[in-house]
Amino acid sequence: MGDSILTYNGGCVLAMAGKNCVAIAADRRFGVQQTTIGTDTTRIFKINDRLMLGLTGLRTDVITLYHRFVQRLNLYRLREEREIKPASFSNMVASTLYSRRFAPYFVEPVVAGLTEKGEPYLCAQDLLGAPLFAQDFVVSGTCAESLYGTSETFWKPDLSPAELFEVTSQSLLAAVDRDCLSGWGAVVHIITLDGIETKFLKARMD
Amino acid sequence: MASIGTGYDLSATTFSPDGRVFQVEYAQKAADNSGLTLGVCCKDGVVLAVEKILLSKMLLKESGRRVHLIDQHAILAVAGMGPDGRQLATRARQECEQYRNIFRAPMPGHLLAERIAGYVHVHSLYWHVRPFGCTVMIGALEEKQGPALYMIDPSGTFYRYYGCAAGKGKQGAKTGLEKLDFRQLSCDDALLELAKLINEAHDESKDKPYEMEMIWIKSDTGKASLVPPNLIETVRQRAEQIAREEEMAD
């Protein structure tokens, strides 16, 4: 086992866009290859009321990078006296990853947020910071291929927050059930201009 | 004023007994030794103007530029030692570029001014470098705050201004600037006002002929650009004409 360092701990993140809303969801498994040792992990971190960051990959790098971004965000807030825009934050993530081009952080981030006007912003990156911008959905993690499949099937444009929650949850659950390294619980956050709503899903605990 | 800085003025790392750093003050004198430099923050943009004394008839016009484009949304004008100002403009460009690389957004004016002021200040802390002998004005267009103007002197002190002046004749120019209503002033009107102020400050008999350099950022285009030479010539002619009319009226 252990063909890739990115699959060592397992886990996945999915983010989808609706009408003036985005949803970002993740499983809650933390494992060491085949052994599951945690079922309450947080992979999605709040940046501000309109922006969330999901990180899959090696757990230690996820935690390190999360602290690094919090540090940079706090300094940004102090210097600029305003909240960061999703596009700027996403670029900051990308340039942080690329700064370690020859000794990378083994994470694959997903940035999901709303612009000031309320338009959805989605960006997924690989471990070197190559960004992928999408208008519909972005995925990351050990079951990324399955997530692409389920999302492609269920997603349609202009979903309301309630519909988006349903579509995101179903896409995530269907995909993680086919992956032994993901699952063990799920969490979904829906971001609208009014705030962030968090829901925990009842999932197969295997 | 002949300040007796004996002994305390040999290096920037020495304070005098009355709490002054003479090297920085001498640098400020170097900055005051240039042609008049003016900056105005209008309701729809920022305009910077420089009175560039032409030292020789052999000099090609438009060379030895003292106004610089820093980024699409930022401009810089130099009063004082040209090469020092050039160095600061280069630094400002690097800061803006790096900011864009990391955040994919234009660098806010107050941050740029702070960084350049910090850079200027750091050169007053060490023995082996000398302070910058120039005052720079930075004009920036910020998304939320709108047009902003900052002036940084050789000590690294900077403030945000509606209008500021540096170089020879700055006292008279400041009085002239105070008369302007910045809330109503548009960039196009500002061009003429600045031309008039430079024209007044310039003494035909004593000083050599001068060229006017102007640079601006207007809110409608959102892009910084040099004011075209024919427009500068137009406002200059108009300013000189107004001056002649006022003289004849007296």
Image: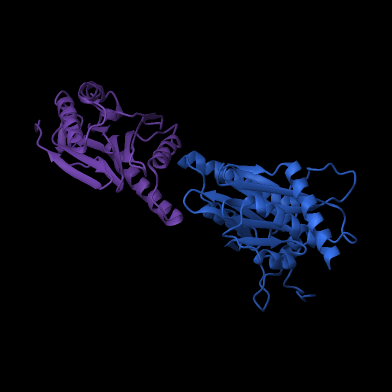
Chain colours: A purple, B blue
Q: Quick one: quadrant of the C terminus of chain A?
A: top left
**Which residue is rendered at x = 17% and y = 37% of the image?**
A162
Where residue B132 appears, as percent x and y from the top left, is 69, 57
Give the residue displayed 67% in from the left and 46% down from the top. B68
For the N terminus of chain A, the quadrant is: top left
Q: Quadrant of residue B35?
A: bottom right
**B226, above or below B37, in the image:** above
Q: Is residue B36 visible?
A: no
Residue A21 in sight in this render: yes
Question: Does residue B12 appear to the left or right of A140 in the view shown?
Answer: right
Residue at image location 45% in from the left, 53% down from the top: A80
Residue B218 location, x and y as percent? 59, 46
Q: Nearer the viewer, residue A150 or A128?
A: A150
User: In the picture, residue A40 is in which quadrant?
Assistant: top left
Residue furthest front as drawn: B249
In the image, is B47 to the left or to the right of A156? right
Q: Is residue B158 above or below residue A160?
A: below
Of residues A175 and A171, which is closer to you in this image? A171
Residue B203 pos. (x, y %)? 85, 61
